[in-house]
Image (cartoon, rainbow, N blue to C red):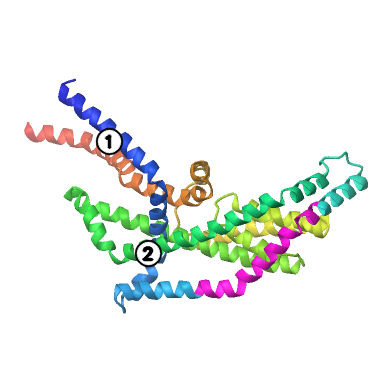
Amino acid sequence: MTARQASVGTVAVLLTFLGAYLVYRLLSIIIVLLIAFIFAASISPMVRRLNRRLPLAAAIAVVYLGLFAVFAVLTTVIITPVVQQTTALIQSTPELLTQVQDQLADLQRRFRLPPVTPNLQEYVAQIAQQAPALAAGVLNVTLGVVTSVAGVLVVLVMAFYWLLERRDIEGTWISLVPRARRAETREVIEEIEAKLGAYVRGQLILAGIVGLISFFGLLILDMPYILVLSLVAGIGELIPLAGAIIGAVPAVIIAFATQSPQEALLVLALYIAIQQFENNFLVPKVMQRSVGLSPLTVLLAVLAGAALLGIIGALLAVPIASALQVILQHTLFRRQQYLANASPAATTRTPATTRTSG
C-alpha cells in the first residue's frame, strides 16, 4: 500500500466516523425531516389534484386548511369527551384494581383455584403514596404536549416548503448523480414517495375504521370509557403487529373489573373478530399499494426501531424499511438480476462470434 492510498483510507475512515457522529448529534432533526417528508408524501396526491386548477402554494394551503378544519372538528367532538373520560379512568384506577382483585378471588373460590396474584390492595396503597410523583408526571406530560405542538408546527413548515420546492430540490440532488443514472434516481425518489404516501394514508384509514368498529362494538356491549378504549384501539392500529394487543388489553381488563368475566370474554371475542376482519378484508383492500414488505421484515424493522428510538422508532420503522427496499431493488437486486440474465446471453453469443471470424 502506497502512502497516498494509506492517506485516502485514513481520510475515508475519519469522514465515516464524522458522519456517524453528526447523525448521532443531529438525530432529532433527522427524525423531524423524515416525518415531514412522510407527511408531505401522504398529502402529495391531493396537492397535485388541486394544483391542476390552483397555483402550487394555494393548493398546499387549501390542503392544510382542510386538515386544520378536520382537526378542529375532531377536537370539538371527540377530544374534549376523551379527556373527561381519561380523567375519570385515572381517578378510578384504584377502584378498578380492587374490583379486579375481587373478581379473581371470586373465580378462585368458584373453581377452587390456588391463589395466582398478589394482594392488589398493596398496589393501591403504593399508588396513593406516589401521588406527588404522579402529579409531576402529569406536568411532564403537559410540557411534552407543548413540545409536540411545536414539533408539529416545524413538521408542517418543512413539509410545506418541501412540496413547494420539491422539483428544484430533487433537481439539485439528481444533478449530483452521473447523467446515465439520473432517470433511475428520479424514479427511485418518486417510487419511495408513492409507497410512503400510500402507507401513511392506508394506516390512517385502517386506524379510523378500527376505532369506529371498536366504538360501536363496545357501545353494544355497554362498556364504560368507550371513547378512550376505541381511541386506544385506533391509535394502536398505527403500531404494526403489536397494535391489536395494545388496543385489546385495557378493554378486556376494564370489562373484567367493571362487568364480569363473561363480559371480558365477549370483549376479547370482539377484538379478535375485528382483527380477523382487518387482516382478511381491510388490509387487502386498503393497503393494496402499500409497502409490500414480508411480515418477518416488518417484525424485525419494528423491533429494531423500538429498540433504537422507542415508540417513534416503531412508527417510522416500516416506512424506512420500505424506502430501503426500493433502493435495494434499484441497485443491488437489479444488478444481480442483470448479471443472471447476462450470463446465458454471453454463452450463446460466443459460438456465433467464432463462426463469423472463421
Mark 2 highlights which residue? Answer: 157
Q: Is residue 57 left or right of residue 92?
A: left
What element does badge 2 sit on?
helix
Mark identifier at residue 15: 1
The reply to whether dot 2 and dot 1 touch (C-beta < 8 Å) is no
Residue stretch in magenta: 70-97
Q: Is residue 30 above or below residue 118?
A: below
Q: Amino acid at mark 2?
A: Val
Mark 2, residues whose alpha carbon is within 10 Å: few (<14), some, or many (≥20)? few
Front residue of 171 and 129:
129
- In this view, the residue farthest toward the top is 1
Q: Main secondary structure of the magenta part?
A: helix
On screen, residue 155 versus residue 80, left or right, reads left
Q: Residue at horizontal 26%, vertical 58%?
A: 169
Q: Earlier in the sequence, mark 2 or mark 1?
A: 1
Crowd rating for badge 1 (residues with CA inside 10 Å; few <14, some 14–19, many 20+): few
Classify the position of the C terminus by image quarter.
top left
